[in-house]
Image: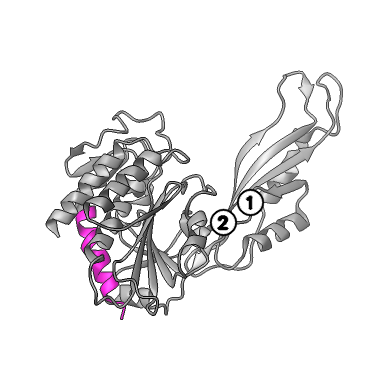
């Protein structure tokens, strides 16, 4: 186990050193392939998604998916470290993707590797290192699901401080358009879309959704962008807003769209309705198993590949979500060392 954990940390360091932005993960997929080759594990690859089944896969047993992603966002301008240098200082392993979600990825790969050759498992295991998670791309986890057997439930590896997220918010990005009449700024204009947007902003600010989730709270609506005009002396003909809506598990994305469309004082269109919220029953065996070994449950405000799957899932992994996408991203080495046996303990509760 010590050697396996050491190798997992080495894998993470190697992945940090490889540029693997969404849609360009071929080199990191190659490195993950090399891990499986080194342990004589049969694997498959679909585009930049790499996956493998346990050696003694039995169709009569339930199948558990272990999944995390190997793509990253681009580093922000606040970095003072080299984002592709995997240095360790004071127990922190620095580097782009170390926390989101490299720590969870290598931990789950190590867990799968440890269990790969075992005959007496009560379940099948499928490991999937997926691509395009950060961009919700079409060639990520969603492209692999049709190629694999039916999944009974999944563990999605994301930084949760090894707490168990049994619910996750969905996401809808809306484009709003306030129309008006263009004119010279020197003349009176009673149809200025910038002035008319005040009513739209007040409408957004006063939005209320009746259904409140026990784990996710209320639906959260946030204006994130406003754009209008390109000259100081011209009243523009329209104003555009972007609305970020984080949906709880009481609504489908389609239901939210219908509610907003009915009362919106302007044009409103969703970019996608595919990223729905999710929740697993508190009576599911994996949730019950987690409670037996004192794993805390919570509802996650952030989006993951859970939004792309239809079967039950939890989100759980080493690292802290508040470090994701930050400058000088890091994960504590001990978080990985502790996560691998914790995952194994959780899987051992499944009878």
From the viewer's side, name the closer residue of 175 and 125: 125
Residue at the (30%, 78%) spot, across then down: 122
Quadrant occupied by the C terminus: bottom left
Which type of secondary structure does the marked residue at label 2 adopt?
Answer: loop
Report the magenta stretch's main SS: helix
Compared to residue 188, the image places residue 45 above or below, namely below
User: Where is mark 2, residue-wise?
Assistant: 275
User: Where is mark 1, residue-wise?
Assistant: 272
User: x and y percent of residue 150 in the render?
Assistant: 47, 70
Give the Cα separation between the discs numbered 2 and 1: 7 Å
Q: Based on the picture, tell me whether residue 346 belongs to the magenta stretch.
A: yes
User: x and y percent of residue 62 in the render?
Assistant: 39, 76
The part of the image, by quadrant, that contains residue 68 is bottom left
Residue at the (25%, 46%) spot, across then down: 11
From the viewer's side, name the closer residue of 66 and 186: 66
User: x and y percent of residue 95 in the render?
Assistant: 29, 38
Compared to residue 55, the image places residue 241 above or below, namely above
Quadrant occupied by the N terminus: bottom left
Which type of secondary structure does the marked residue at label 1 adopt?
Answer: loop
Horizontal arrangement in the rendering, residue 135 relative to residue 208 (left or right): left
Compared to residue 149, the image places residue 185 above or below, namely above
Residue at the (44%, 73%) spot, across then down: 152
Q: Are marks 2 and 1 in contact (CB under 8 Å)?
A: yes
User: x and y percent of residue 285 in the render?
Assistant: 37, 78
Horizontal arrangement in the rendering, residue 327 relative to residue 172 (left or right): left
Residue at the (32%, 48%) spot, across then down: 33
Q: Which residues are magenta?
A: 335-351
Q: Based on the picture, tell me whether residue 162 belongs to the magenta stretch.
A: no
């Amino acid at each position: 186990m010590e050697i396996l954990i050491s190798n997992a940390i080495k894998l993470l360091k190697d992945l940090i050193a490889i540029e693997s932005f969404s849609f360009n993960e071929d080199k990191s997929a190659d490195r993950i392939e090399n891990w499986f080759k080194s342990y004589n594990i049969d694997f498959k690859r679909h585009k930049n998604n790499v996956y493998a089944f346990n050696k003694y896969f039995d169709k009569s047993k339930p199948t558990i998916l272990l999944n995390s992603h190997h793509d990253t966002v681009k580093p922000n301008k606040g970095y003072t470290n080299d984002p592709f240098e995997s240095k360790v200082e004071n127990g922190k392993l620095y580097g782009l993707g170390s926390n989101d979600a490299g720590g969870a990825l290598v931990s789950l790969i190590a867990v799968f590797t440890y269990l790969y050759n075992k005959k007496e498992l009560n379940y099948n295991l499928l490991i999937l290192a997926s691509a395009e998670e950060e961009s919700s791309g079409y060639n990520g986890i969603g492209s692999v699901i049709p190629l694999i057997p039916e999944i009974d439930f999944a563990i999605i590896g994301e930084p949760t401080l090894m707490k168990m997220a049994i619910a996750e918010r969905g996401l809808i990005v809306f484009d709003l358009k306030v129309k008006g009449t263009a004119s010279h700024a020197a003349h009176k204009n009673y149809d200025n879309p910038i002035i008319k947007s005040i009513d739209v902003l007040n409408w957004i600010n006063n939005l209320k959704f009746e259904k409140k989730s026990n784990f996710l709270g209320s639906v959260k609506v946030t204006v994130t962008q406003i754009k209008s005009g390109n000259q100081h002396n011209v009243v523009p003909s329209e104003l555009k807003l972007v609305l970020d809506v984080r949906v709880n598990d009481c609504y489908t994305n389609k239901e939210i769209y219908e509610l907003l469309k009915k009362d919106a004082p302007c044009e409103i269109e969703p970019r996608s309705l595919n990223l729905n919220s999710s929740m697993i029953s508190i009576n599911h065996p994996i949730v019950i198993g987690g409670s037996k070994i004192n794993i805390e449950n919570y509802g996650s405000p952030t989006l993951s590949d859970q939004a792309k799957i239809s079967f039950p899932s939890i989100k759980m992994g080493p690292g802290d979500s508040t470090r994701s996408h930050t400058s000088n991203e890091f994960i504590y080495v001990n978080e990985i060392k502790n996560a691998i046996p914790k995952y194994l303990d959780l899987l051992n509760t499944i009878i």
